[in-house]
Image: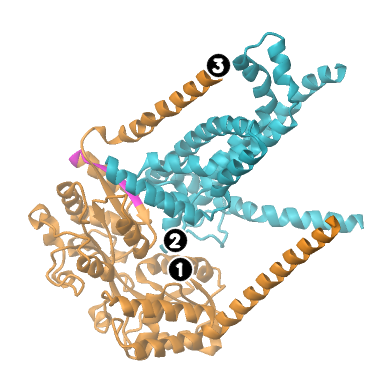
Chain colours: A orange, B cyan
Amino acid sequence: MRKKWFSIILAAAIVASFPAGPATAASVPSTGVTINVYNWGEYISPGADGSMNVNEEFTKRTGIKVNYTTYEDNESMYSKLVSGGASYDVIFPSDYMIAKMIQEKLVQKLDFSNIPNYKYIDQSYRNEVYDPKNEYSVPYTWGVVGIFYNKKYVKEKVDDWKILWDPKYAGKILMFDNPRDAFGIAQKILGFSYNSTKTEEWTQSAKLLEQQKPLVQAYVMDQIFDKMSSGEAWLAPYYAGDAATLVSQDPNIGFAIPTREGTNFFVDAMCIPKNAQHKKEAEEYINFLCEPDIAAANMDYVGYSSPETAAKKLLPKETQENPIIYPPQSVLKNSETYTNLPDDTSLMIDTLWAQVKMGGPGKTATLAAVLAGFLLLYICIVVFKKIKKKRELQ
Amino acid sequence: MKALSRVYLFLIFLFLYAPIAVLIVFSFNASTTMSRSVWSGFSFRWYSILFQDQMLLDALRNTMLIAATAAIVSTVLGTAAAIGIFGMKKWTKRVVMNVTNLPMVNPDIVTGVSLMLLFTFAARILGGSLGMFSLVLAHITFCLPYVILSILPKLGQMNPNLFEAAQDLGCNPLSAFFRVVLPEIFPGIVTGMIMAFTLSIDDFVISYFTSGTTQTLPIFIYSMTRKRVSPEINALSTLLFGTIIVLLLLINLRNSKDKKPSRAPQMEV
């Protein structure tokens, strides 16, 4: 009888603990509205080390609280949004992802009467290919892709992508660890578009990347900074926004944008997902981030380029005149923006990329054979042991 | 031979602790380029930045809150479950143990995705969205088997007659449990709880799928990888490592103090 009582008390305790959970979670937004903002990691001024805490400033001005969370790439943001369970009010996808989300009706049209600060956005950054009528997005940052090089070891002039294929620098070359950017470089060398839908063009690029593979030290993303500043690697393609800080701190490191072959011009813009719960407040947040002084504070921390001339003017003079962050128009002339590729094309690129990194279909077959061999061996051992045991029992 | 074994031991400790040592050293790096490999002088710069970074502190607070709740709840549930399982018949015990071990041998990604599907399904029916609560539930789920596993052997080591002896001497079952069984299995409970706590702190995969709009520390750190993982994280990891070392030392000190008086009466018996 006592045992029963004990279990009843225990069950009651478990049940009682349940409401306690959501109560603590809900106590944060009890006053006013909280918007969920989903941005890239380290892509806003955080308020440390003398910079402005942008989210706190927004709450101070409007009374709207911000639940600010971060992601590491477009694809993981997309999957989080699609898989459900989380509703965001403001997101910051890149160009091609915006096109994809518009197509899949995952983002909604903005009410620009709530975003008067849109007037600060320069004409040249409006109506880009990913959002031709500019109904869904407000640009936040932009940038280009270029090549980092170590001046001590790379004496020649760096002005085209082919230098990443130069056997002289074997083992000292780094490469993007994502298919779109890595293939993009090969596409430009071959003179193709980033947004090509022709299978043969992509297979040619894959062949080019396979040729480059023996020269490549590693396929990396953020480790580029460490490997470049320590001299472990001499050549690496990366985003210009991140280059400025590294170049200004380390006189040995240079940065070049291949103008002749052309480079990737990318935009990260603010959008509101379809299932946002506080659209009006989200628009207020977007409007706030377009405020020139706020945009300037963000760009000063992030290092990427602002689409607002008014914000650019508030930045330190050396930043404004830095050709890496604000390259002249002549550099951008040949640049191209990514757009959303059809599903079968992106699937094909992913497969080709896997082949490049794994070393072609031949190696996959050997790997499978080795694995099958191990499995067979394991089964043999198990069967042998069983037989032995049976014999011992008899 | 002895020298060789010393070298071997040294190498093992080197491989175990060199990464942590490097991390601690670089948390004091004065470099402003956020470099993790070039030393440019000693400073507390990253520590001061760390304590100004509201986003990071929020993520840390979430992680700690979740870990503490998950550890406490899973310890209570796990203790009860372990005692129940221990009293079962051989076959039921086997079946139940297999069921409880399943989340442990299951790849994290499978647990994560299936929990996410379950939670989004439940959220659709009951309303609400994923967040702190779903994270705590998920963490309790994967911590439970570890707690059960660390308590069961302690129950096995216990003299099965102790419980009955206590009742013979006038305890009712409840007070016999609290006065006799609980102290006997207490070390197992503490181990289970610490294990649950640490597992919860460093879980990434399951949290990633079940977090909704809440961010824990591992997710926050991972999201830095497009740009650079800031050396603040070195500073934070150093502090966490230091705290854990101090905690471990305290526990060990307390244990060694406890052992002397508790052993003595046992000897007399």
Residue drawn where x is 17% and y is 59% of the image: A108
**Mark 1 — residue?**
A221
User: In the rendered structure, are the residues bearing label 2 and label 1 in contact, judged by CB atoms less than 8 Å apart?
Assistant: yes
Task: Give me the chain letter of mark 3.
Answer: A
Residue nearest the viewer, comparing A273 with B57: A273
Residue drawn where x is 86% and y is 56% of the image: B5
Residue A156 vertical position relative to residue A350 in the rendered view, above or below: below
Residue nearest the viewer, comparing A65 with A367: A367
Q: In which quadrant is the N terminus of chain A drawn?
A: top right
Element at label 3: helix
**What is the number of the mark on residue A2?**
3
Residue B74 vertical position relative to residue A361 in the rendered view, above or below: above
Task: Give me the chain letter of mark 1.
Answer: A
- Start-end of magenta stretch: A62-69
User: In the rendered structure, are the residues bearing label 1 and label 3 in contact, judged by CB atoms less than 8 Å apart?
Assistant: no
Label 2: how many Cα within 10 Å (few below 14, some 14–19, many 20+)? some
Say what amino acid the circle numbered 3 marks: Arg
Q: Is residue A67 magenta?
A: yes
Label 1: how many Cα within 10 Å (few below 14, some 14–19, many 20+)? some
Give the CA distance from mark 1 to mark 3.
Answer: 62 Å
Q: Position of residue A138 (x, y in %)?
A: 19, 62
Say what amino acid the circle numbered 1 marks: Met
Say what amino acid the circle numbered 2 marks: Thr
